[in-house]
């Protein structure tokens, strides 16, 4: 008779192939069927920007975007991302330029210890792209309610999000320079 604990350990010893786009780059990797996205990002891919906080989906430190939607990577199995676009805080900046959310967090001093900052930025950049979320402070606070800042930088985080909103609107209406892609 086989010991159940031996059987359960061997049940997940095989890996599955996972194809996704990570921070704009196509990627194929082998993952355990029970591996959560957070652990794959941090341990397998070495992307330490996504933080491991509560591991229960309650703090938002592990927030990433999957197909443009903010979600807790500690609650999502990596294999659920098959064929999807995953963006981490490392993927917000483009061509050496900070994303407006990253820039505004710096300018508004929207972090103190910095632990929650990557998750805050990922949620903020997703909400700024979501037309269903209002632009008023109350709507932003509600949309960001899944991200906890233990240092209490909420006022500055809100200011940074609203500043990034203005910058993104300006960027969208600014004429493009000749020869610049």
Image (cartoon, rainbow, N blue to C red):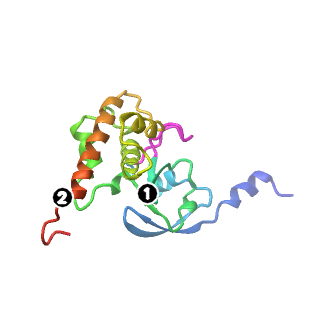
Disc on res. 68: 1
User: Which of the two residues, 34 or 158, is positioned nearer the viewer here?
Assistant: 158
Q: Taking 87 as reference, is 26 above or below it? A: below
User: Which of the two residues, 38 or 70, is positioned nearer the viewer here?
Assistant: 70
What x and y, as percent, mark residue 80? 57, 60
Q: CA distance from mark 1 to mark 2?
A: 23 Å
* Quadrant including the N terminus: bottom right
Disc on res. 130: none
Residue at 41% across, 46% down: 123
* Span highlighted in magenta in the image: 50-62
The reply to whether residue 8 is visible in this rendering is yes
The crowd level at tag 1 (other Cα within 10 Å; few <14, some 14-19, many 20+) is some
**Residue 56 colored in magenta in the image:** yes
Q: Is residue 151 left or right of residue 97?
A: right
The reply to whether residue 111 is visible in this rendering is no
User: Which of the two residues, 171 or 101, is positioned nearer the viewer here?
Assistant: 171
* Quadrant including the C terminus: bottom left
Which SS class for mark 2? loop
Which SS class for mark 1? loop
Q: Taking 99 as reference, is 19 above or below it? A: below
Query: If you read the primary sequence from the N terminus, does the residue marked by circle 1 or circle 2 appear first?
Result: 1
- Count the labels in the image: 2
What x and y, as percent, mark residue 162? 29, 40
Q: Which residue is mark 2?
A: 174
What x and y, as percent, mark residue 138? 40, 33
Which residue reaches farthest top?
Answer: 152
């Amino acid at each position: 008779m086989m010991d159940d604990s031996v059987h359960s350990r061997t049940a997940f010893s095989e890996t599955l192939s996972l194809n996704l786009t990570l921070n704009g780059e196509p990627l194929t990797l082998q993952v355990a069927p029970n591996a959560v996205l957070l652990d794959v990002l941090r341990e397998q891919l070495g992307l330490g920007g996504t933080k491991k906080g509560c591991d229960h989906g309650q703090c938002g430190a592990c927030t990433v975007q999957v197909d443009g939607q903010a979600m807790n990577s500690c609650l999502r199995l990596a294999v659920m991302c098959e064929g999807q676009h995953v963006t981490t805080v490392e993927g917000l900046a483009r061509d050496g330029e900070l994303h407006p959310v990253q820039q505004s967090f710096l300018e508004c001093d929207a972090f103190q210890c910095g632990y929650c900052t990557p998750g805050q930025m990922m949620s903020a950049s997703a909400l700024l792209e979501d037309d269903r979320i209002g632009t008023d402070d109350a709507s932003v606070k509600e949309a960001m309610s899944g991200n906890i800042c233990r240092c209490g930088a909420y006022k500055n985080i809100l200011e940074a999000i609203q500043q990034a909103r203005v910058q993104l609107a300006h960027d969208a209406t600014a004429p493009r320079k000749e020869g610049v892609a």
